[in-house]
Structures are given as C-alpha cells and as structure tokens.
Image: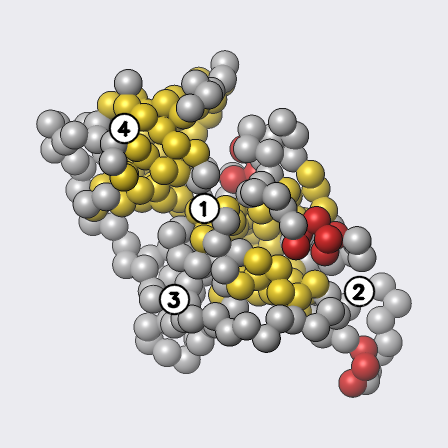
Amino acid sequence: MSSTVVHPLRDAYAGAQLRDPQGRPLLLTGGSVITANPSMGDWQSADVLIHGSVIVGVGPGLLTAAEDDNMIVIDCAGAVVLPAAADFASPAPAATLSPGEPADIAVLRITDAPGTLQGAVPSRGSHLALLFIGGRLHLHNDHAPDTTAASPSPAVSSPAASSPAADHPHLGTWVDESGFIHQELRPDGRYDEARGDRRSAYRGRYWIDGTRIDYLDDLGFWAFGEFRDGVLHHAGYRFTRR
C-alpha cells in the first residue's frame, strides 16, 4: 500500500479525493496544530489523523506511518489546524482536537494564495481552506460549505498517570488481522509496536480506563483505542491478543 499526497492549499483538484477517501485515513500534516486541550498543548508543526468520523491521533511523528496505513496525506504547511467550533474565551472549550473526539476540524491559510487580489476586497475569498465535520469534507478553499451543523464536543481530560496492575487482562501482545503490526502492552505502562520487519517502530506510554486506552508516543503524538468483545480497535485496525 502507498500513501497519496494532496495539496489542498494549492491544488484545485484535491477536493474530489478528500470528499471520497473510500475508507482511507486522512492525515493533516505539517500545519500549526491548536488542540484547545490544555492537557495536550499545541504544536508549531504536527499531524492530525482522521479515520472515519473521529480523530485517532494528534501530534508529531504520525507521518511515518503513512505508507503502512495507506493514508491520504494532506499537506497543511502554511496553515493553522484547529477545532471547527473553537471557543478560546471559555474556560472549558466546547471542542478539542483530541483522539476519540469527532473530526470537526478547520484548516486556515496563514497567507493568501498566489494571485489573490490585495486589500479588503469582499470577493477575494476566505482563509478557511478546509472544513471537516464528522470526518467529511464540507468546504475546500472557496467552495460553499454544507449547512449541516456539528454538535460541540466535550473537552477531554488527561489520563491518570498510573501503570496497570501486573495481572491486568489487557496486558500482552496484540496483533492486527494481517499479522503486520504487533503491539505489546507492558506492565510498566509502556507499549512497544513493531511493524513488519521494523522492530519498535513506535514506543511510548499508555493508560487504560475501562474499555478505553490512550497512547502518548515517544515521538510526541497522542492516539487512542477501544477494547470491545476481546478486540482492540485502534486507528482503523482490529487487534487480538496473542
């Protein structure tokens, strides 16, 4: 599998690919990411990974999995990526860019596209380059957005900084259906993920709260998964314990 790179800030034909990703993950890469989540913070340059209708990863380093996961890579260099329903005046933001939250995301150009008219001209277009609601593209550059409203997302609290018990039922090695990815959940609260012949492709900390698992990779990105009926669902993959 191979990733596809699209340049929505420059390419007029990128919208068609983004509107119909055919089940492939979308990776917003290289933009300045404003999460509105004080537990996670912001990045001058980072990635936001969308799968289906939710955000599954946020932070630097996600681009390294683009080929493995057959992502559509969306070049957001020169743009700000932030929640579509951002409210920076509220002490508890209505929406955040956090793993597990709905993919309601706005991408704003920092500068005008080449050839844009100068000055305050009403017809010059908007700096809102991309708008995703529930993971679906609703606006691409100057195209009119869909009028469907999005429900605000609650803020996500940080996971408790404690390691799982040594006899926790979810400890051990989890393998995806193809056998390509092996993710080991260790009793010291750290995970080690191998991909094919790349040992320790990803490593970091994890926290389990009920059926949810949160990851903080050593590369700096956050991700999450859910345990349902003995299966770990994570970033579009299904893992079983071996």
Residue situated in front as seen by the camera: 22 or 66: 22
Residue 183 at x, y = what percent? Answer: 36, 26
Tag 1 secondary structure: strand
Mark 1 or mark 3, which is nearer the start of the sequence?
Answer: 1
Q: What's under tag 2, amino acid-wise?
A: Ala
What residue is disc 1 on? 57
Q: Are marks 2 and 3 in contact (CB under 8 Å)?
A: no
Q: Which of the marked residues, 2 or 3, is nearer the chain's N terminus?
A: 2
The circle on residue 42 is none
Q: Are marks 2 and 1 in contact (CB under 8 Å)?
A: no
User: What residue is pinned by disc 4?
Assistant: 185
The label on residue 113 is: 2
Q: Residues within 10 Å of mark 3 (few under 14, many from 20)?
A: some
Q: Amino acid at mark 1?
A: Gly
The disc placed on residue 153 is 3
Q: How many marks?
A: 4
